[in-house]
Amino acid sequence: MRIKKITEVIGCKVYTDSGDYFGEIEEANLQENKVDGWKIKVGGSVMSLVGGARGVIIPHQFVRAISDIFIISKSALPSPDPEIDEVPEDLI
């Protein structure tokens, strides 16, 4: 296994483990000399899930692989909130 420097992965493309394009690595968050999370500039079809935010921070535990690209777990993505059209009668 080859160890990569953080500077080598800045700008790498990020994909989910289901193959969806997520964005690009902007920077790493370090805590006690270890990578705690990754700041990702969001792009592609995932932008609708993050509510117009230009970037997100994904904890390092959701990173599945780092090589020429990053692969993150799809469970790291925020789930969209379903729109509520009606108020249930028992709440009125």
Image (cartoon, rainbow, N blue to C red):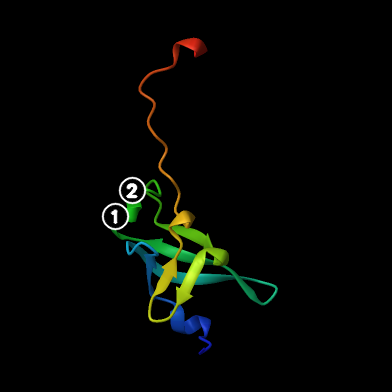
Q: Which residue is identified by label 2?
A: 48
Q: Is residue 76 above or below residue 63?
A: above
**Spatial separation of the CA atoms under disc 1 and disc 2:** 7 Å
Q: Position of residue 74 (x, y in %)?
A: 43, 58
Based on the displayed image, in which of its 4 quarters is residue 29 positioned? bottom right
Q: To which quarter of the image does residue 59 belong?
A: bottom right
Q: Mark 2: few, some, or many residues within 10 Å (few <14, many ≥20)?
A: few
Residue 19 falls left or right of residue 29: left
Residue located farthest toward the right when viewing the structure as drawn: 32
Of residue 55 and residue 81, the one placed in the foreground of this image is 81
Q: Label 1's element?
A: helix
The answer to whether the residues at label 1 and label 2 have Cβ atoms under 8 Å apart is yes
Q: What kind of element bears circle 2?
A: helix
Residue appearing at x 29%, y 55% in the figure:
45
Total label count?
2
The outermost residue toward the left is 45
User: Which percent across, then down, holds residue 8?
Assistant: 45, 84
Amino acid beneath label 2: Ser
Q: Is residue 34 left or right of residue 52?
A: right
- Amino acid type of the residue that numbered disc 1 sits on in the rendered structure: Ser
- Residue 64 spot, x, y in % from top left: 48, 70
Q: Residue 66 carries which label?
A: none
Residue lying at 45% horizontally and 11% vertically, measured from the top left = 89
- Packing grade of label 1 (10 A; few <14, some 14-19, many >=20) is few
Q: Tell me what residue is drawn at x 46 percent, y 62 percent.
A: 73
- x then y, percent, for residue 76: 48, 56
Q: Mark 1 points at which residue?
A: 45
Residue placed most toward the observer, 83 or 41: 83
